[in-house]
Image (cartoon, grey):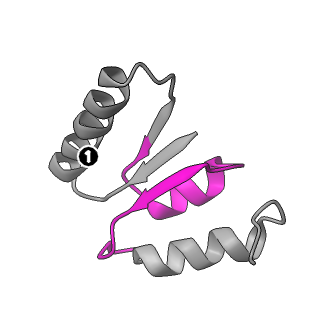
Amino acid sequence: EIVVCDDNIEDLNHVTDLLNNIFENKSILFNIRVYLSAGEMLDAVQKIDIGILDIAMKEYNGIEVGRKIRDTNNWINNT
């Protein structure tokens, strides 16, 4: 599962369009979930294969979100 989180709807749509084009051109099956809020994403997401996080969000920045995901999910390999 690919998760994209950005508090700017235009940027969120742009990234999602790029990902759709890449995966469709390569005939790769994929699922993209989008979030406008880091808090909403953290509450909803159970597992992430690929995460694309805005580095400058109001609620949390992308680095903080990545750390929260890592710290609260034991399925992440930290090696």
Residue at (34, 21) in percent of width and height: 24
Closest to the observer: 72 or 58? 72
Picture coordinates of residue 76, whole percent (x, y): 75, 65
| Picture quarter with the N terminus | top right
- Is 23 on the left or on the right of 33, as rendered? left
Residue toward you, 27 or 73? 27
Residue position marked by numbered label 1 in the rendering: 15
Q: Choose top left, top right, bottom left or bottom right for residue 67.
A: bottom right
- Asked whether 25 or 54 is in front, the reply is 25
In this view, 62 is above or below 23: below
Q: Position of residue 60 (x, y in %)?
A: 44, 76
At x 71%, y 49%, the residue is 46
Tell me where residue 26 appears, x and y as whole percent: 37, 25
Q: Residue 35: image x %, image y %? A: 42, 48
Name the element at disc 1.
helix
Is residue 45 within the magenta segment? yes
